[in-house]
Amino acid sequence: MPKEHIVQAYDAELGNLEKMIVEMGERARLQLDQSITSLVEHDVALARTVVADDIFIDQLELEVATRATQIFALRQPVADDLRSIVAALKISSDLERIGDHAKNISKRTITLTKMPLVSEFGNSLRRIHALVDNMIHDVLEAYRGRDAKKALAVLAQDTEVDKIYTSLFREILTYMMEDPKNITALTHLLFIAKNIERIGDHATNIAEQVYYVKTGHYIERDREKADQAISIIIE
Amino acid sequence: MTDLIQISPLSAKAVPGLTGRYRTERNFQRLGRLAIAMSLGFLMFLIVSISYQGVGAFFKTEIRFDVEPAWHDEAAGDSYALLRHIVREAEPEISGRKARRDFFRLIGADAEDVLRATIPDKKFIWLPASDDMDMAVKADFEEGASRLTEQQLDWVRMLAEEDRTRTRFNMGFLTNGDSRDAERAGVGGALIGSLLTLVICFLLSFFVGVMTAVYLEEFAAKNNWTAFLEVNINNLASVPSIIFGLLGLALFLNIFGLPRSSSLVGGMVLALMTLPTIIIASRVSLQAIPPSIREAALALGATQIQMVFHHVVPLALPGMLTGAILGMARALGETAPLMMIGMVAFIADPPGSFTDPATAMPVQIFLWSDSPERAFAEKTAGAIIVLILFLILMNLGAVLLRRKFEKKW
Amino acid sequence: MVEIMDTYIEIKSVNVMATTDNPTPPKMTTKNVSVSYDNNRALKNVHLNIAENRVTALIGPSGCGKTTYLRCLNRMNDLIATCKVEGEIKLGGHDIYARDVDVEVLRRRIGMVFQKANPFPKSIFDNVAYGPRIHGLANSKEELDAIVQKSLRRAGLLDEVENRLNASGTSLSGGQQQRLCIARAIAIEPEVILMDEPCSALDPIATAKIEELINELKERYTIVIVTHSMQQAARVSDYTAYFHLGELVEQGETNRIFTAPKNSKTEAYITGRIG
């Protein structure tokens, strides 16, 4: 923000909103991190914590929505203020979805601990998680610094995520065909992979919002989806 | 009971210095009230003393005499003879030339006028008393209050006891012209003279003044020249009035040869004197018209002159009229310039036209105040009352005019 | 076997704000307009086009020159002796500061409504009839009546004053007075109506009525409005021009100005950050 508002309370309100978004983001990252750890290390207790903690992110989302509505009503924001509040609303819902995905992963983790097999995918999962985690980290940085360049860089990272996801998808399918006994566990794993990939998409959504907040218009590009899993056919 | 007096935290005593502030305020208000009381006191003193002295001028004493229709025929139109006859018949016991003449002095100089105007078939007649007797009656026969002799005073007492005296409203005071005889003298001539003078003064100064103000305020460019004009107009307003009299004398009488002592010249001189006042008042009331009204008219495509005469002048008119009437009121009270152009002369007949010799109220007052006769002192005060009433009437007119034409926005 | 089909999901450009500014034909054009009072520059090199049948809002902090600019458009600045206008202002292609231009004719084509409602202290009828009368627009009493009725109706005031046309214009409420002034302005059928903060003294209901009226009026007239209320500019105008310290900082579609202004000064002003 270039300068402070004449009404300082307005600045405080906008600052609060930003703080809540960042907190949501950090919480979502932590949730994701813990869900992956619990998955890879078969830590049911941690998985349960993740499931239980999702409520905090949900509450934060509600809080952001309430505060944003209040600012709309009381301050009639325009220009960059308006954009940043609209973006905050959208980002918070993306972050809430990220939290939901993490929760979903943890729920599946609890189911999966009763079955073997995850260890084979441990490395791939950690890799894709590291990428997605980095995306969330970067997009939060970009958000805090209103950095359009960084936001664009986050968009670029999603391509990599999609690629790993596609290969994971293919891998899991291959495993399924090899031994139909594992289909249950592998399906859960497939969904987990999908969850992580979706989180990447949410991160790109957030990046787009950050770009919009900064520049006043949405990214003009033909987004080439590297997630080619939708067109994979295995015969 | 405790020794401690509880002071409310909301009371003035709870705040240091506050009581002192209130005291200052109260003292200031007291001073203001004192000033008002003093000015009211002076005013009351003026009104009371003038009324006390002057109210008698509006009343006159009359004496009743018996009269027979036949006496009219005997006198054959000679009202002086008739008067002598009436007095002789009424007071047969007064004998001797001197006594008769002294008694005759009790009867006013205007008694003959009354006799001339009466219808002959009356049984008795009320004749005006002389100013000396009038004074005596009004002073309640006080010793030394009149110029009457003991003998005359006795007669007056006798007349009063016989119920042959009465006090009546003195209409003549308002209608008569000036006279050497106090009982005949009235302010009528001066009133008409003042009125005619004011008509001239108003016609000249109002239209010239208003047009000057409108031009200066609405059309003239604001530059050094107009600023110079403005300063001079303001200066003119404070020039002593006698200077205007001198100007009138030199210009109107000597150069233009207009009739001396006439209300025409008086009005012209007073117009000169009132003009700056009216110009200033008109400019102020023009300035008071909000620019929004001018802009509204101009934005509709009105020309400057349409804007001024459709909107600004009608709205400023009440103010201009008020200014004019106040200027007139000042003109009404002016003596000095009128004296310079000869309106100070003794003029017995009320003027019939603008060019007739005339006098004016303040000049009349000045003339009478110079008169040695006691009765004229009363007349002077009476004339002052008339003048003040005239002024009040004019100011009232100003207020009513303003009320009527004033528009609110 | 794994077969990969190339699929492109095209994301259409969503940049709706990037449309070109002022595409409608200009009713008035101003080029390089500078105004000075006693050598104090009030306006510097303003280039601005006023789109026909659109509402153009002029916003900016006090003393930014927006009212000065507005008053150049119908030459109300002529009233101020020290005011000097340079540059070119055209109405329908004709220079309004040309030598042979008559300001009364110009002002008949460009009406004005002022900040403070300024009805003449005359009857409602006379207020509206004044313009048509001085310009001789009505040949008979009936025609004049019709003009007054029509103008009052267009100003949305007829229902409220129909049975008291002889009442004083100043007896109306503030909002009604302002609409009376609008009725008075449109009675002479101008092409452009200039409004100088017309709602600054009105309550929100009266303001809303005026704003609705502006919205209806733009079908017939080109409107330029100076306003201190950015919300009002956002609500009523199609185009917005932001003035700052005598300069036209930014102009464009109101939509864009209020969501994504290009200039940081504009942004600072409309978001309330100006120091």
Image: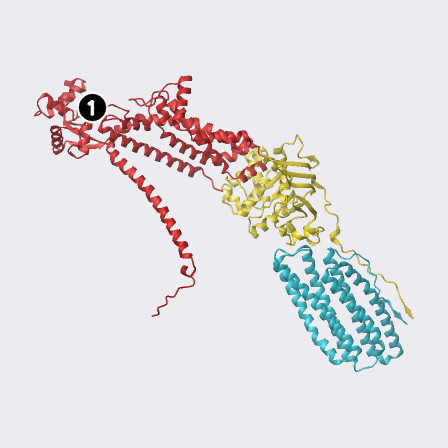
Relative to C244, is C146 on the left or the right? left
Provide the chain ID for the residue under circle 1. Answer: B
Q: Picture quarter containing residue A107?
A: bottom right
Relative to A94, is C123 on the left or the right? left
- Residue at 74% across, 60% down: A210
Q: Position of residue B172 (x, y in %)?
A: 25, 28
- Which hue belongs to chain C? yellow
Crowd band around label 1 with a 10 angstrom C-alpha radius: few (<14), some (14–19), many (20+): some
Relative to C103, is B33 on the left or the right? left
Foreground pick, B39 / B61: B39
Q: Position of residue B395 (x, y in %)?
A: 38, 35
- Residue at 26% across, 23% down: B179
- Which hue belongs to chain B? red
Q: Picture quarter containing residue A3?
A: bottom right
- Which hue belongs to chain A? cyan
Give, as a three-letter code, the residue at label 1.
Ala
Q: Position of residue A190 (x, y in %)?
A: 82, 74
Foreground pick, C161 / B278: B278
Relative to B59, is B317 on the left or the right? right
| Residue indicated by mark 1 | B109
Q: Picture quarter containing residue C129?
A: top right
Seen in the picture, residue B368 relative to C219 is either above or below; the reply is above
Seen in the picture, residue B130 relative to C122 is either above or below; the reply is above
